Image (cartoon, rainbow, N blue to C red):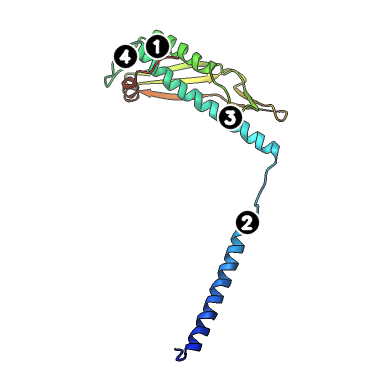
Amino acid sequence: MFKSKKGQILAFAVVFIIIMAFGFILVNKGGTAKTVASIGNKQVNILSAYAEAEKAREYVKFSAEHSAALAAQELDVATTQDCFAGLDKTTFEAAFTENMLKYLEIYNSTDKELNVSALMYTYDYDYQDNLVTVKAFAQEPGIVVKSNRIDFTYTIQGYVETDFTCSEYQEYSKKKFLPI
C-alpha cells in the first residue's frame, strides 16, 4: 500500500492517534457514571428496618426446623421412611415449644441501632406419616422493629410455615445437635 517508509510511519501514526483518541473518549465516558437515584438517611433506616424484620422471620423459620429436629431426637423418633407415623403429638409439641422458646429468647439484632421486639409465637401442627408441618403465628402486633436513629417503627406479619420431612430429620440425626 505505502511503498515508502515515511508513508508507512505516517499511516501507523494516524491509526495510533485515532485508536488512542477513541480509548480516551471511552475511558472518560465510563468514568463519569451518573447517579440515577440517591436515597437519604431516613430511607436507609427504613430499608435497614425492613431487612432486619425479614432476617428475624428467617431466624424464626430456621429455629422452627431446628426445634422440630431436636424434639424428634429427644423423643428418639426412628429415622425410617415414615418416621412420624407413631409420634406422640402432645409430647412432641411440648418439646418443640420448649426448644423454640429458647431460640426466640436469644435472638438479637445485629444492628445496634435497631431494636426487635420480643418474638412471641403460637403454633399449629399438621402431622403426616413422613412430614410434620409447623405453622408459627406471631402474636399481635407481629415482628416490630424500632429504629434508634429516627422515630420510626416497622411492623411485619410474623407468620412462618415450615415442613419438616423424614429425610430432613435423617440429615439432622446424623449430627446429634446439642440443645441450647
Report, in whole angstroms, how far the alpha carbon at label 3 lies from the one at label 2.
31 Å
As drawn, the label of residue 33 is 2
Report, in whole angstroms, how far the alpha carbon at label 2 lies from the one at label 4.
60 Å
Report, in whole angstroms, how far the alpha carbon at label 1 lies from the one at label 3.
30 Å
Q: Answer with mark 1 or mark 3, whichever residue precedes in sequence.
A: 3
Whole-percent x and y of residue 100?
48, 16
Between marks 1 and 2 in the image, the one whose residue lies nearer the viewer: 2
Residue 126 visible in the picture: no
Between marks 3 and 2 in the image, the one whose residue lies nearer the viewer: 2
SS class, disc 1:
helix
The amino acid on which the numbered mark 2 sits, given as a three-letter code, is Ala
Q: Residue at x 61, y 63 (%)?
A: 28
Between marks 2 and 4 in the image, the one whose residue lies nearer the viewer: 2
Between marks 4 and 3 in the image, the one whose residue lies nearer the viewer: 3
Q: 10 Å neighbourhood of mark 1: few (<14), some, or many (≥20)?
A: some
SS class, disc 3:
helix
The amino acid on which the numbered mark 3 sits, given as a three-letter code, is Glu
As drawn, the label of residue 77 is 4
Q: Answer with mark 4 or mark 3, whichever residue precedes in sequence.
A: 3
The amino acid on which the numbered mark 1 sits, given as a three-letter code, is Phe
Quadrant location, the N terminus = bottom left
